[in-house]
Amino acid sequence: MKSSVHVYVDPACDFLYASFYIHGLKQLFPSLSYSSRYFKSFKHNNCHFAFVLRRGKSVFKGLIDFGDSYEIDAKALEWCDVYGKININAERCALSTHPKLMALGPGFAIRLHAPVKTWRLALINYMKAAPRIGNKRRFFADYYAQLRRQPLSYYQAQPSLSDYIFFAGALWKKEQETNRTRANYIRACRRLSGVRFEGGFAPRSQNDIPGYEDLTMAANVPMADYLLKLKESATVFNTPVILDCHGWKLGEFMALGKAVVATPVINQLPRPLNHGEEVLFVDGSEEQIYAALEKLIGDEALRRRLEENIRAYYLEYVAPDRAIARLLKHGRFEDI
C-alpha cells in the first residue's frame, strides 16, 4: 500500500532539476521527507539525485540522472536498484544496456512551493547536508531559480492560433549545429505569408557569438510571458542541444500539447516519436523547415492531431507520476 511507504529524498539534491521528479514522488506517495541518512556518498550536483523508498525494513534505492551527458555514473549505478536517465545513447556508452537502466522522457523544472516554504526548505536541507554541498551559492541558486518557474498545473494544452508563431531560444557557444538549425527555423518563420512571427534568439550579455545579430531579440522574454506565447503559437521547434541531449523545451512542448517541428531525436526516448503522428521531423535545412511550417499552417486537422498525440505521449510516458511509476516498475519495486 502507498500509505505504508515512506520516501526519503537527498537534501543535497539540485532542487531545480529534481523538482519535476520530486513532484512525481509526492503524487504517488503521501509520506515524503528529506534526510541524509541514505545518501552519504552523494554530493550536491546538477547531474542526478537519489531517493529511497522504505516499507517496513525493506529499502528500495532509486536514482534519476538528468544530466546532459550520455555518460552513466558507475558508482551511482552500483548504489541504486534502478537508474532512470533522460539522456541515453547506446552508441556512445557501453553501460546503456545495463538492466538497472531505464530511459526517462525529457523533464523540466517546475515550482513546487510558495516562496516562504521554499526558502525554509532550502535552509533546512542545507543544514542537513552542508558537508556534502561544495558550492553554497549554487545550492541556494537552485531554489531561487525554481521559484521563477511555473507550477506543473500551468502546463495544460489550449487551442493554438493558426496565424501566430513564437520562438525564443538561446545561442550556444559550442553547439554550432543547434545555432544553425534554430536560425533556419527563424528565417523560415519570417518567410511565411499571413503569419505573425514573434521572437528570435535570446540576447547574450557579452554579445560573443557573431553572425546572428539580425535574428536576435532586443530583450529576454520573462518566463510567464514565454509560456503564454508558446500556448498560442501554431507550432514550436525542437533540436538537440548539448551532447545531443533532450532539452527542457521538448518536455515543455509535450506537456503543453504543441505541434512540434523537430530535427531527428538522437538520444533514446521511452518510445520513439512517430513522424506525422506526434511530430514532424525535418533535416534542419531552411527549405525543409519552411515546407513543414506551410503544411502545418494550412492543415488544421494535422496540427490538431499532432497536438493531441504529443500531449497523450506526455501523459503516458513523461508526466512526473508516470515517469516515477515506470521507473519503479522497471526496478520491480513491488517485489521488495
Image (cartoon, rainbow, N blue to C red):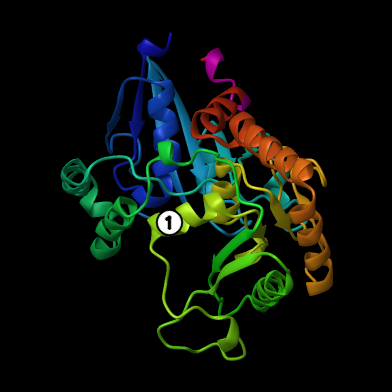
Q: Residue at x 19, y 40 (%)?
A: 117
Q: Which residue sits furthest top?
A: 1
Number of numbered callouts drawn? 1
Label 1 amino acid? Asn
Q: Position of residue 21 (x, y in %)?
A: 45, 38
Residue marked by disc 1? 46
Q: Residues within 10 Å of mark 1 (few under 14, many from 20)?
A: some
Residue 5 vertical placement versus 79 (above, below): above
Q: Residue at x 54, y 25 (%)?
A: 325
Residue 252 visible in rendering: yes
Q: Quadrant of residue 59?
A: top left
Residue nearer the viewer, 208 or 288: 288
Asked which secondary structure carries label 1, the reply is: loop
Residue 181 vertical placement versus 136 (above, below): below
Q: Which residue sits furthest front?
A: 194
Q: Position of residue 11 (x, y in %)?
A: 29, 43
Residue 168 vertical placement versus 302 (above, below): below
Q: Position of residue 316 (x, y in %)?
A: 63, 29
The range drawn in magenta is: 330-335
Q: Residue at x 25, y 57 (%)?
A: 140
Q: Position of residue 226 (x, y in %)?
A: 46, 59
Residue nearer the viewer, 220 or 145: 220
Would residue 235 be counted in the magenta stretch? no
